């Protein structure tokens, strides 16, 4: 079953008169339960591609389908709902909210799903337990190390039991032991029928995926 | 996001400019009045005592008084000379100059220099005139039945104010022109100030011992006090209030914007510090940024002061000159005061550890900024309420003074009144009478009128009805007067014709009988006839033409059955609806034509607004300047709130887009921001209203006007702050909502 699909997607960044074409006609089908890794040189457009897949960015040209529906024709609040209930995003730059404690950052998606506050905290602590940070639940992002922030960001993606997990360099700041724990967590999701897409520079991690693609010159190539 | 930064700078700079302008004007006004005062003190003799007739004491003045005070003064140390004056005034219904009798040395004692000509000789049939009468020099004029030759003109002196206020329009006659006179004022000049001060106490004791109905004072104080009082009132009321409110707004806007600008650069400063800059150096840089802002604002203040000056002078009638000195001092003041809003920001900046700052983070961002925005709003609402309450109270006060006189009513009076009464115009008021009333009724003009009435006025010096004499104004009226007079029945009814009934004002009723109820049925003896009191009315709080005042007595003219020779008539008309106001003027012309004489001024229609001089007076000017100010403050407050909101959102934009990325809808975020802010604004609004009521209470008490709160408008003003806040948030959201999430997440 097809979960999401990119059809002939182009992305061009414009800075004044200069045009930077990043994605040049991507066709990409993602089935339910797939485990895909995306590699590619720095600046190739991997994060851009993931943003488009995660419905937080729009292609310059081409269509994005989610559950068979064209995202370009959806209302803003529909897109928000899709993200809030189905997509777990792990950002390359973490994107935690500095004013919120770790657990509050994790619980944020539930907050917008309308889950009661007590339940939110309960679930957030559960997920933080899984990433090994339950004792840091009341810390603010500025009080955490880079690796810890990353694990909080991952916990935030996992809390909704997403159908699609988009992880942008999820182990970039982690030592090998913690990398392994995190990858295990993410891979557990795949066994529960979730779809996992990991962007990584690390060939060892890339090779763990069932399918590996390479983004080069704005095109996707099977590796 | 440079638009936001620019708007921040503009708001701060314009707040500073407003403060600076008002400070400059305040200091300028103070300076001007000080300069006027010291010039005045040079102009007037500061070694003169004034002994004035005390009219509150009714004891008789023996003809010996003049001689006795002269003898007494002569044996005092340092006594120089003595001048006398008597009988200032004019009569209303004839051609007559405002005149006063003075001894020849009066002019030197009072320091009234001549413009042209000479001083009259004692007892001569000569006159010296004030500057506005300078055309009369060399002519013969008739004053108080004397045919006098104008021999001198004084320099313009009314500008000195105080006791010299009327000099320019006055005709001075020799004190002894009509033989024996009792002085109203005695001026005692001494050799120096010290001997005058000693003499003051001695004369005071002497007057007391001799039981003369006179009081003694220092002449110079009459000027000084007057001016200082004026200064204190106007300055104290309008300017200081303005400065205070403007300062609050400035401090808050400056704090917010310097803080915002600091946050803008926090990361840059973090990197600089990582590269070796000291915390002090960074603070210095932040301070410099604010200093630039202050300088720009203060420059703008100079421009604003020049623009506001005529507006202010027009509204308050108070002369201010924005001098360079005033501007400089106000600059120093602003610099000092702004320290309070800038220094917390600077110390915050200095405390930021570079490791956080470099990531664009701060130890903690003070929430005070949002709180301050609320204080601005409170100030704005307070200012608005002050204006609402003052305006309303003044209106109510006018009603209290004038009775319920309607707006479509005009009065034609035989009295000289207010603006008609110019000292330089010796013409009297046309003596309107009953036949004028009949002529008007029979003219074509009456077709445009809804009601016409006539009233004759008499001054009753005493009525035999009581043991002690009671003096009052009697108005003998024609039908229709009850509905036109602005009087309201509080008890009983209007007199019925042919039954010799009378209705009395409540103030008089209370004075004569203790209360309104006991007045009913009582008898009054007027013009040799007994009248029964049929009712008590509530009218204007003081006598004004046409309208019935609460200390007057009304009877039907028909019952009086005669017209007394010294009665003064007044015609009151009400126009039909939709008839233009021009009709009032036409009636005035009609009446003027019936009394065509060079002795009389043209007849004028008096309207409600003409009868309330206080409305032209400092209170209403004060209220007007408060209106102006409250408008400015509300605008500044609103602008402040708007930029504050946009800036808050701009700093939260990354956070908001993260929220959107994890599933929040725009509506959810909007509500999350709107609800607490609006709640806060709603909670704080009554504070502003309360503050406004408190300030108005002080002003109203100071000016003794009638206290009246327009509750509905005050209640409506409460909705302003939540309204502004929610508008600001919604507009800010409209600006940011549809931007790309990814791009916003990259902003820092
Ligand atoms: N808002 C933007 N404006 C202009 N250019 C942009 C913008 N965002 C990204 N780019 C450019 O697009 C290209 C792709 O960026 P992207 O972040 O997708 O790369 P990436 O493959 O994730 O790289 P990395 O491996 O370093 O994370 C880069 O060259 C980047 O400079
Ligand atoms: Mg990337």
Image (cartoon, coloured by chain):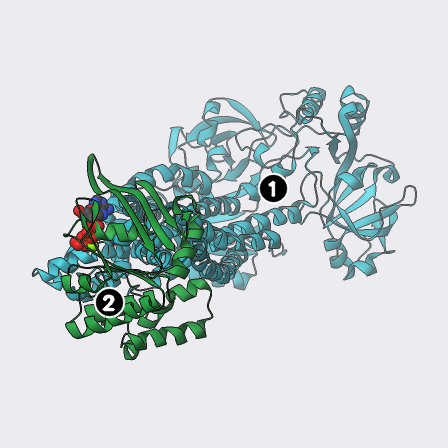
Chain colours: A green, B cyan
Residue A150 badge: 2
Q: Determine the image quadrant of residue B314.
A: top left
Residue at coordinates 63% horizontally, 29% vertically from top-left? B428
Q: Residue B486 appears at what percent x and percent y?
A: 73, 43
Q: Residue B447 appears at what percent x and percent y?
A: 79, 23
**Foreground of the two, B398 or B554:** B398
In which quadrant is the C terminus of chain B drawn?
bottom left
Residue B556 showing in the rendered view: yes
**Foreground of the two, B494 or B714:** B714
Residue A59 showing in the rendered view: no
Residue at coordinates 69% horizontally, 33% vertically from top-left? B410
Q: Residue B129 appears at what percent x and percent y?
A: 47, 31
- Is B517 displayed left or right of A56 in the figure? right
Q: Which residue is mark 1?
A: B612
> Farthest residue toward the right?
B498
Q: Is mark 1 within 8 Å of ligand 1?
A: no
Give ligand 2's quarter of the image. bottom left
Both labels 1 and 2 in a single chain:
no
Q: Height in image: A129 above or below A219? A: below
Residue at coordinates 50% horizontally, 57% vertically from top-left? B692
Q: Chain of mark 2?
A: A
């Amino acid at each position: 079953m097809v979960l999401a699909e990119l059809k002939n997607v182009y992305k061009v960044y414009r800075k004044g008169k200069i045009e930077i074409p990043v994605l040049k006609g991507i066709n990409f089908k993602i089935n339910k339960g797939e485990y895909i890794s995306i590699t590619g040189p720095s600046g190739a457009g991997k994060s851009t591609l993931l943003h488009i897949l995660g419905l937080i960015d729009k292609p310059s040209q081409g269509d994005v389908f989610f559950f068979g529906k064209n995202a370009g024709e959806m209302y803003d609040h529909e897109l928000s709902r899709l993200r809030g209930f189905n997509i777990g995003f792990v950002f390359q730059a973490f994107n935690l909210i500095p004013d919120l404690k770790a657990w509050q950052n994790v619980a944020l998606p539930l907050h917008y799903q309308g889950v009661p506050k007590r339940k939110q905290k309960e679930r957030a602590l559960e997920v933080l337990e899984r990433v090994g940070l339950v004792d840091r639940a009341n810390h603010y992002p500025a009080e955490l190390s880079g690796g810890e922030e990353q694990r909080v960001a991952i916990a935030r993606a996992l809390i909704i039991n997403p159908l699609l997990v988009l992880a942008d360099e999820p182990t970039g700041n982690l030592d090998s032991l913690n990398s392994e724990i995190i990858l295990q967590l993410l891979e557990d999701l795949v066994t529960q029928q979730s779809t996992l897409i990991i962007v990584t520079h690390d060939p060892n991690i890339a090779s763990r995926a069932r399918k590996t693609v390479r983004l080069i010159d704005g095109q996707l190539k099977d590796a | 996001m440079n638009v936001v930064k620019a708007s921040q700078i503009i708001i701060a700079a314009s707040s500073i400019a407003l403060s600076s302008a008002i400070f400059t004007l305040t200091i300028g006004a103070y300076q001007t009045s000080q300069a006027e005062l010291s010039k005045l003190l040079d102009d007037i003799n500061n070694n003169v005592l004034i002994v004035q007739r005390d009219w509150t004491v009714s004891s008789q003045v023996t003809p010996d008084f003049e001689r006795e005070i002269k003898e007494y003064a002569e044996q005092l140390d340092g006594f120089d000379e003595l001048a006398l004056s008597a009988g200032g005034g004019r009569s209303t219904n004839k051609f007559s100059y405002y005149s006063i009798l003075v001894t020849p040395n009066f002019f030197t004692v009072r320091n009234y220099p001549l413009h042209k000509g000479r001083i009259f000789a004692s007892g001569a049939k000569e006159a010296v005139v004030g500057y506005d009468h300078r055309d009369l020099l060399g002519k013969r004029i008739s004053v108080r039945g004397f045919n006098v030759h104008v021999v001198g003109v004084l320099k313009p002196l009314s500008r000195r104010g105080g006791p010299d206020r009327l000099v320019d329009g006055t005709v001075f006659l020799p004190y002894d022109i009509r033989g024996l006179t009792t002085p109203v004022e005695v001026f005692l000049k001494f050799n120096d100030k010290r001997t005058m001060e000693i003499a003051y106490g001695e004369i005071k004791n002497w007057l007391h011992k001799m039981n003369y109905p006179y009081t003694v004072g220092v002449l110079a104080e009459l000027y000084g006090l007057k001016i200082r009082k004026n200064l204190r009132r106007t300055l104290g009321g309008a300017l200081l209030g303005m400065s205070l409110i403007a300062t609050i707004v400035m401090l808050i806007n400056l704090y917010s914007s310097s803080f915002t600008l600091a946050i803008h650069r926090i990361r840059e400063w973090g990197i600089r510090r990582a590269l070796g800059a000291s915390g002090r150096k960074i603070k210095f840089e932040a301070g410099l940024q604010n200093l630039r802002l202050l300088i720009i604002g203060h420059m703008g203040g100079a421009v604003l002061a020049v623009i506001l000056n005529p507006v202010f002078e027009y509204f308050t009638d108070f002369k201010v000159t924005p001098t360079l000195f005033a501007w400089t001092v106000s600059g120093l003041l602003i610099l000092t005061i702004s320290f309070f809003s800038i220094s917390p920001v600077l110390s915050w900046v200095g405390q930021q550890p570079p490791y956080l700052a470099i990531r664009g983070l701060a130890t903690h961002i003070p929430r005070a900024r949002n709180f301050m925005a609320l204080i601005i709003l409170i100030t704005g609402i307070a200012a608005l309420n002050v204006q609402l309450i003052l305006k309303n109270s003044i209106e109510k006060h006018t009603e209290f003074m004038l009775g319920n006189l309607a707006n479509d009513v005009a009065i034609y009076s035989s009295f000289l009144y207010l603006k008609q009464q110019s000292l330089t115009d010796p013409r009297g008021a046309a003596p309107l009478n009953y036949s004028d009333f009949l002529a008007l009724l029979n003219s074509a003009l009456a077709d445009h009128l809804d009601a016409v009435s006539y009233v004759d006025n008499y001054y009753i010096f005493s009525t035999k009805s009581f043991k002690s004499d009671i003096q009052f104004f009697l108005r003998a009226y024609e039908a229709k007067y009850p509905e036109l007079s602005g009087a309201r029945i509080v008890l009983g009814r209007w007199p019925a014709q042919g039954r010799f009934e009378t209705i009395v004002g409540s103030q008089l009723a209370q004075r004569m009988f203790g209360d309104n109820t006991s007045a009913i049925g009582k008898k009054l003896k007027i013009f040799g006839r007994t009248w029964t009191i049929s009712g008590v009315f509530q009218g204007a709080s003081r006598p004004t033409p046409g309208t019935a005042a609460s200390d007057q007595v009304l009877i039907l003219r028909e019952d009086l059955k005669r017209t007394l020779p010294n009665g003064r008539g007044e015609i009151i008309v009400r126009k039909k609806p939709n008839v233009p106001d021009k009709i009032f003027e036409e009636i005035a012309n009609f009446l003027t034509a019936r009394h065509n004489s060079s002795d009389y001024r043209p007849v004028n229609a008096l309207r409600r607004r003409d009868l309330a001089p206080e409305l032209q007076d400092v209170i209403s000017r004060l209220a007007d300047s408060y209106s102006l100010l409250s408008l400015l403050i509300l605008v500044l407050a609103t602008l402040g709130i708007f930029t504050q909101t946009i800036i808050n959102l701009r700093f939260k934009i990354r956070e908001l887009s993260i929220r959107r990325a994890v599933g929040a809808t725009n509506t959810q975020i909007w509500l999350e921001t709107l609800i607490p802010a609006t709640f806060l604004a709603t909670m704080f609004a009554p504070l502003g209203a309360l503050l406004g009521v408190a300030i108005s209470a002080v002003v109203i008490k100071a000016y003794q006007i009638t206290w009246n709160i327009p509750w509905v408008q005050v209640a409506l003003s409460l909705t302003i702050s939540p309204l502004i806040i929610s508008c600001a948030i919604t507009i800010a959201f409209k600006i940011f909502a549809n931007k790309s999430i990814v791009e916003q997440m990259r902003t820092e």
